[in-house]
Image (cartoon, rainbow, N blue to C red):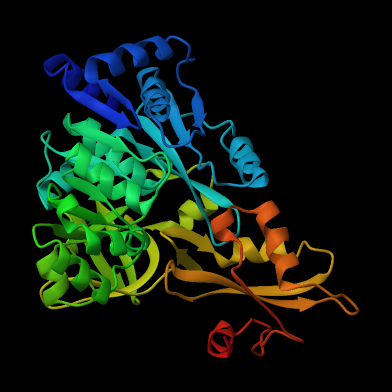
């Protein structure tokens, strides 16, 4: 089964049902199907198709038209800087034959500093976003799903497939605004919303003033970063009718989900593994396997695949533990990764940009606490002899080379980065110093 085939079935049985809402536009399954059919004729079968569009109905049309033409979709976040986009466009053209059931390549930054494309099949996307989520959350074709994050992002794609894969309705926010989000939930009678903790923090003052505008909500899916206990407790008290489901996973794999009761009963848990997913802890690292729960592999990255896949298990790079009842806890994240506002930022990627500056001798990047975004990027910079830079000029330089959310929010200048006997930067000391 392919994603466009699921859509065609829903369009045939409920053609007049609203498929997508964005701004003032409302499109039925029949109308969306006709547009997809027209666009499909403009596609070359079997090609990899980059889709870089803002959150819109056009994004949905282009993605499904590509799938209908047998193409592999490569979503590109519009917030990426030009050099980042150029790298993806070049990398995705590598002469590697696509399997007939590949669906999408989701590019995610790697610890080497260059993005890696996670290759997902149609089965991956259907199992992870329909089978797993129906079982874990009880969603159905009767739900109205709200996407607040970019559709090109893993979480946004999840809400897209939740909705159109089940025959429900997808409500898209073109650009997030907390007041508008609450108005949209009320007007469209949204029942399921994808809200990262950063988004919930932004919406909280408005929710406090008008909790009744969320009366239609029955499920909130919290992903992309950990859900702080205090934020969970306050939001749950304001919206007692809502079930909050925290999700642990990544572009490469689906892992677990925790209900509100599980999070309150076992603070810090990311839940039990999803149906059909196996998890084990080896040398403190979280390993995953299961039918279509893990990506096919990294696109054109044999070395990365050899490191990530061993003995049939996918090595997540996250450290964790499991309790006696099978509940999973993530005790540390992938090395040097910062999660800011729900986006993953790898320190190495930012460091490589910083050291290209003619006045910077070396740099180290860490994540530091941030009241709004959960974490923020902080850069420690060694200048070349005789050089002089301001923090603002360093931030501006990074902004020209990286997506806005990857640039440092804090810059500290140091005479020398602390290192161990092997020359490795001691980031724990930098965190203490900050």
For this rendering, which residue is in front, 298 or 77? 77
Report whether 428 appears left or right of 326.
right
Report whether 95 appears left or right of 155.
right
Exactly how many numbered labels are in the figure? 0
Residue 327, position as x, y percentages in the image: 17, 71
For this rendering, which residue is in front, 123 or 18? 18
The residue sitting at 51% across, 39% down in the picture is 76
The correct choice, above or below, for 347 with respect to 85 in the image is below
The residue sitting at 71% across, 68% down in the picture is 392
User: Which residue ends up furthest to the front in the rendered image?
Assistant: 209
The residue sitting at 68% across, 59% down in the picture is 398
Residue 376, position as x, y percentages in the image: 51, 70
In the picture, which quadrant includes the C terminus?
bottom right
Is residue 127 visible to the viewer in this orientation of the structure?
Answer: no
Is residue 314 visible to the viewer in this orientation of the structure?
Answer: yes
Report whether 255 appears left or right of 262.
right
Residue 87, position as x, y percentages in the image: 64, 43
The correct choice, above or below, for 71 with respect to 392 in the image is above
Q: Quadrant of residue 100?
A: top left
Q: Quadrant of residue 201?
A: bottom left
Residue 74, position as x, y percentages in the image: 48, 35
In the picture, which quadrant includes the N terminus?
top left
Report whether 38 appears left or right of 292.
right
The residue sitting at 71% across, 76% down in the picture is 381
For this rendering, which residue is in front, 427 or 415? 415
């Amino acid at each position: 089964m392919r994603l466009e085939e699921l859509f065609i079935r829903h369009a045939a049985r409920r053609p007049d049902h609203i498929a997508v809402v964005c701004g003032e536009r409302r499109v039925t399954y029949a109308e969306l199907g006709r547009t997809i059919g027209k666009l499909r004729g403009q596609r070359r079968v079997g090609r990899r198709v980059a889709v870089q569009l803002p959150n819109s109905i056009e994004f949905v049309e282009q993605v499904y038209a590509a799938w209908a033409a047998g193409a592999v979709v490569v979503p590109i976040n519009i917030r990426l800087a030009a050099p980042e986009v150029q790298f993806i466009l070049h990398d995705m053209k590598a002469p590697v034959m696509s399997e007939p059931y590949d669906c999408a390549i989701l590019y995610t930054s790697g610890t080497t500093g260059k993005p890696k494309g996670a290759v997902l099949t149609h089965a991956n996307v259907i199992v992870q976003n329909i089978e797993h989520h129906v079982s874990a959350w009880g969603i159905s074709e009767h739900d109205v799903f709200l996407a607040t994050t970019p559709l090109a992002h893993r979480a946004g794609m999840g809400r897209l497939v939740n909705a159109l894969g089940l025959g429900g309705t997808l409500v898209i926010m073109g650009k997030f605004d907390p007041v508008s989000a609450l108005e949209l939930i009320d007007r469209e009678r949204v029942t399921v919303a994808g809200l990262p903790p950063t988004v919930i923090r932004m919406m909280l003052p408005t929710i406090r003033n008008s909790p009744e505008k969320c009366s239609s909500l029955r499920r909130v899916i919290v992903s992309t970063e950990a859900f702080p206990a205090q934020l969970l407790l306050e939001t749950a008290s304001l919206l007692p009718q809502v079930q909050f489901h925290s999700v642990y996973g990544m572009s490469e794999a689906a892992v677990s989900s925790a209900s509100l009761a599980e999070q309150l009963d076992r603070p810090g848990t990311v839940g039990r593994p999803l149906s059909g997913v196996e998890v084990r802890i080896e040398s403190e690292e979280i390993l995953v396997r299961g039918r279509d729960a893990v990506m096919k592999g990294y696109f054109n990255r044999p070395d990365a695949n050899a490191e990530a896949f061993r003995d049939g298990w996918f090595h997540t790079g996250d450290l964790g533990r499991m309790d006696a009842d099978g509940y999973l806890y993530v005790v540390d994240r992938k090395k040097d990764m910062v999660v800011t506002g729900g986006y993953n930022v790898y320190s190495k990627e930012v460091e490589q940009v910083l050291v290209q500056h003619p006045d910077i001798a070396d740099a180290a990047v860490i994540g530091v606490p941030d009241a709004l975004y959960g974490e923020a990027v902080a850069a420690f910079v060694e200048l070349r002899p005789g050089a002089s830079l301001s923090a603002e000029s360093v931030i501006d330089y990074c902004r020209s080379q990286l997506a806005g959310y990857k640039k440092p929010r804090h810059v500290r200048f140091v005479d020398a980065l602390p290192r161990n006997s092997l020359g490795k930067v001691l980031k724990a000391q930098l965190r203490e110093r900050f």
